[in-house]
Image (cartoon, grey):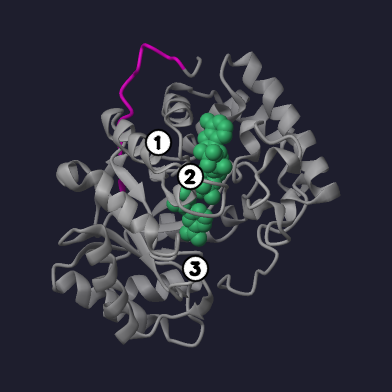
Amino acid sequence: MTTNNTSRPPLGTRTLGTASPLTVSAMGLGCMGMSEFYGTGDEAEAVATIRRALERGVTLLDTADMYGPFTNENLVGRAVADRRDRVVLATKFGNERAEDGTRLGINGRPEYVHTACDASLRRLGVDHIDLYYQHRVDKTVPIEDTVGAMAELVQAGKVRHLGLSEASAETIRRAHAVHPITALQTEYSLFTRDIEDEILPALRDLGIGLVPYSPLGRGILTGAITAPSDLESSDSRRTAYFPRFQGAALEANLALVTAVRRLARSKNCTPGQLALAWVLAQGDDVVPIPGTKRVRFLEENVAAAAVSLTADELGAIESAVPREAVVGERYGDMSSIDG
Ligand SMILES: NC(=O)c1ccc[n+]([C@@H]2O[C@H](COP(=O)([O-])OP(=O)(O)OC[C@H]3O[C@@H](n4cnc5c(N)ncnc54)[C@H](OP(=O)(O)O)[C@@H]3O)[C@@H](O)[C@H]2O)c1
């Protein structure tokens, strides 16, 4: 399997959630890096990537108001303006930022939920959002109040389905009691498997889908990053905000990627494809959203859906990247994480 895969098997669909089900492509497209965090984006290439994704059967596009800030929603809105009916649009609120990018904190207050939604609808240029997530749980506001306001958005027809991001099992249960939660978006990859202990079982118990973000470990699992110098100087992965990409931690983590590369070679696929195939193999309720701003990477990532792994192969991958072997926290500041 190569990036130029010509057989192009269909991507297929998966359904997120049972009480408020949403059918989407088995893999979505993360649009964040097109506007911020991972180096400089090119608007024309980003739009081409989104449109190529739709041609390849990707329906789920992921953005957030805070990406840019704000410009990523504009970009996604422009890219899909003449093809809105083919897209499942997912965006998020709650990581409040000022126009100049300053982070203002986490805001889950009910009145803010309404304001943020109206602003996202305006920037996206749409009359409804298909999947609206709270980006981070506001520990100063009862989740019932935040989700109550999100439910009002559903009743008003502005939002079709609700999601949470980086919420604990306890928060998810309380939220789901107020209004059905369709999906939890949270970090999940060969490099980040903490949710397997409590959160994933809770999702399955409640009938809530999982949307793994950073399924490529923010790019490291593709093998394309071999040293900090491979990243632009403005790339946020070069900062202490991402400990796994710093110094000795990066070196230890790259040794794990070498093992993934070796296994990928034996499957005749790329390391990134093997990493995505592993996520896809975790269940039909799992819809990863690998992020890219390039058509070439998009093609490669979509083709990962055709890589099927046996139980033995899954075991070999998990032995090559033991959970406890990954060095460094996911974020330099974990204080905004719920639980
Ligand atoms: N809910 C949350 O808190 C949260 C947090 C982070 C991300 N997200 C969402 O999840 C999406 C995906 O996560 P992510 O972007 O952080 O991480 P990711 O998908 O694990 O990795 C993205 C990185 O991998 C690179 N890449 C992608 N495909 C590649 C390929 N085939 N070969 C080589 N490199 C490749 C991208 O490069 P290029 O940029 O050069 O294309 C980018 O640097 C985001 O876009 C965003 O929508 C949500």
When asked about the image quadrant of residue 163, the answer is: bottom left
Say what amino acid the circle numbered 2 marks. Answer: Gly
Horizontal side of 161 relative to 217 (left or right) equals left
Q: In which quarter of the image is the C terminus?
A: bottom right
Residue 41's tag is 2
Horizontal side of 141 relative to 160 (left or right) equals right
Say what amino acid the circle numbered 3 marks. Answer: Ala
Q: Residue at x 57, y 28 (%)?
A: 274
- Most common secondary structure along the magenta stretch: loop
Marks 3 and 2, how far apart at CA: 30 Å
Residues under numbered marks 2 and 1 in contact, where contact means CB atoms less than 8 Å apart? yes
Q: Closer to the observer: label 3 or label 1?
A: 1
Whether the residue under disc 2 has CB within 8 Å of ligand 1: yes
Q: Which residue is drawn at 46% across and 26% down?
A: 296
Q: Give the range drawn in magenta.
A: 4-16
* Residue 68 point in image, percent of width and height: 45, 60
Residue 261 on the magenta segment: no
Q: Mark 1 points at which residue?
A: 45
Q: Residue at x 41, y 80 (%)?
A: 108
Q: Mark 3 points at which residue?
A: 167
Q: Closer to the observer: label 3 or label 2?
A: 2
